[in-house]
Amino acid sequence: MVTKKAAAKSTQGKARNGSNVLIVGSVALDNVRTPFGEHNEVLGGSCAYASTSASYFCPTSIVAVVGGDFPKPHLKFFADKKIDTTGLQVVPGGKTFRWRGYYEYDMGQAHTLETRLNVFADFQPVIPENLRRSQFVLLGNINPELQLEVLKQIRGPKLALVDTMNYWIEGKQEELLKVLKKCDIVLLNDAEARQLCDTTNLQKAARRLLKLGLSRVIIKKGEHGCLMFSGKDYFTAPAFPLEFIKDPTGAGDTFAGGFIGYLAGAASLSDTTFRKAVMVGTAMASFTVEEFSLKRIGNLKPQEIVARVNQLRKQTDFGTITVK
């Protein structure tokens, strides 16, 4: 079990003042094979993708755990992106979480060959004191019991976004529902929404989730874009059309990071801001899948992000019509 002393040890100096987004989840070493190549021991995990995406819009901090075998170049990557790793626990002698999997030509589903939780199996998130007043919090798809522990340590966040997956819906649904009641927004895919709400209709699923006290529900539909529901309104965003997709790993986490990062960096949280955040998240996810690991998302220029979001806007703008 990771001790509090180990948790408090900073891997990258002191946290920067005014950190806007706190992301709690996994940092992993991935071994991925797709029809376009195979890459081993590359940086992965929900924290890695989400924090990289968010870092383009606001100061970002992570809370996760790695082993003593975690490559130093990956730590340098976080440092170069100015991602605060005060909350990154390093377990000397431990081994970092590893995932091995592959994708077939449809690229729609990851096939897991091996999962080694290693130090992640005993992960106990301890939020450093200077990060407990973070105003925007992203809970990656870790055990809902751990998500609840994180929420107990955070002091009055302005917005809490929670991500989840079918594994927790099946095995920890009661705990997951407790988490949802304490958060503002939930992010899940269409199959997970149907499973959690026991309905085939996504609109009904969203309405049931909103009744838990959530302000918004975002349902991802992969290559078909996503839906955002709030109150009596909803917003739909298309996926960005890509000619080549090399590696879909981390696309959902990248969306979440871009979404909450944009919100944290915005002047206000209006309905328009939330819609823009969805489009930003969609654009960021589209960059991720163009290369393996964080090779593409980690080397973007601001003008590239703006251009792609504008392309998405034009893609859905068809002007007005008249009927005589």
Image (spheres, grey):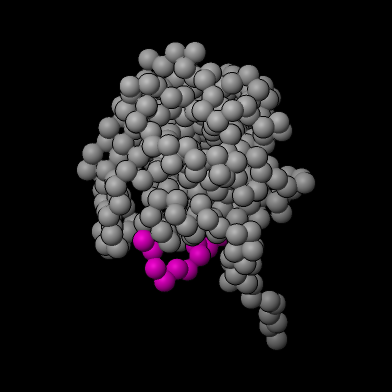
In the image, 276: left or right of 89?
A: right
**Residue lying at 38% horizontally and 33% vertically, measured from the top left:** 70
Identity of the residue furthest to the right in this view: 267
- In the image, residue 198 sits, relative to residue 12, either above or below, namely below
**For residue 216, which quarter of the picture?**
top right
**Residue lying at 32% horizontally and 43% vertically, measured from the top left:** 41
Res. 92 visible in picture:
yes
Q: Nearer the viewer, residue 116 or 144?
A: 116
Which quadrant is the C terminus positioned in? bottom right
Q: Position of residue 4 (x, y in %)?
A: 49, 13
Which quadrant is the N terminus positioned in? top left
**Residue lying at 60% horizontally and 55% vertically, measured from the top left:** 280
**Residue lying at 43% horizontally and 41% vertically, measured from the top left:** 73
- In the image, residue 195 sits, relative to residue 249, either above or below, namely above
Determine if the magenta segment contains residue 240: yes
Q: Position of residue 91 (x, y in %)?
A: 39, 22
In the image, 72: left or right of 280?
A: left
Q: How many marks?
A: 0
Res. 212 visible in picture:
no
Determine if the magenta segment contains residue 54: no
Q: Nearer the viewer, residue 87 or 169?
A: 87
What's the magenta region? 237-246
- In the image, residue 228 sits, relative to residue 180, either above or below, namely below
**For residue 138, which quarter of the picture?**
top right
Q: Position of residue 87 (x, y in %)?
A: 54, 26
In the image, 100: left or right of 43?
A: left
Identity of the residue furthest to the bottom in this view: 324
The secondary structure that dominates the magenta segment is loop
